[in-house]
Image: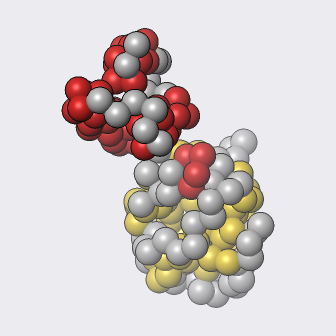
Amino acid sequence: MSVASIFRELRSNAKYGVDLYYLSNLLNQLVTGKSTSESDITALQGDVTAAQGDISDLQSTKPAMVLPLSGPANTYLERVGDTYAAVAQFEFPGSVAWLSPTHIRALVHWDNGGLATKMAIRVYDVTNAHVICEKLNIADIVPTAHDLGTLTDIPAGRAVWEVQVKTDNAGGGARASYVGLIP
């Protein structure tokens, strides 16, 4: 059985269309000369191109990670204060296991019952001690979706992340209803 025919059989029977470990072994056989016929090379090139399409399709359909944030009596979590504090923690599986998010969105607003006039939200990587993204000067008093800006230093491995909020003054509450990581 040729390398290309083995690969075609694998693609037709695999749950997601391609077994990357097996594909790397087949390509290694091809590169090391264990299967060098021209028909094998031509057939394998076509199958590799098709497999790349399968991989791209899988990556584009990877679900977003959405974290609903709500308390027992509210549809949001609230923090009163002018310094960042966590309203939620979660484990980010890492860019290798899940892909790097391209952006992070949050549904937020602030309570105008106090002295605050604006709020801010950020996603903080506790494991690696740095800010992933941050949105400042949010003046919405009704829940509004915001993109949290440029993402920095997405870890390859698992990390604990926090959703942190604050207001611009000690009075008034910063509220977050959800955070979504979009691949």
Which x, y percent locates residue 152? 53, 75
Residue placed at 24% from the left, 32% from the top? 38
Foreground residue, 116 or 2?
Answer: 2
Q: Give the vertical position of 139 relative to 95 (above or below).
A: below
Q: Quadrant of residue 170?
A: bottom right
Residue, far right: 127
Left or right, residue 55 beside residue 106: left
Which x, y percent locates residue 29? 47, 35
Q: Quadrant of residue 140?
A: bottom left
Foreground residue, 96 or 25?
Answer: 25
Left or right, residue 117 beside residue 155: left
Left or right, residue 27 beside residue 121: left
Foreground residue, 33 or 103?
Answer: 33
Q: Give the vertical position of 118 relative to 56 (above or below).
A: below
Which x, y percent locates residue 82? 68, 84
Q: Specify whether residue 20 is in view.
A: no
Residue placed at 69% from the left, 63% from the top? 162
Q: Give the vertical position of 172 relative to 31 (above or below).
A: below
Residue placed at 29% from the left, 29% from the top? 37
Residue placed at 49% from the left, 71% from the top? 151
Q: Quadrant of residue 132?
A: bottom right
Q: Specify whether residue 40 is in view.
A: yes
Which x, y percent locates residue 111? 56, 69
Quadrant position of the N terminus in the picture = top left
Q: How many marks?
A: 0
Q: Give the vertical position of 95 relative to 140 (above or below).
A: above
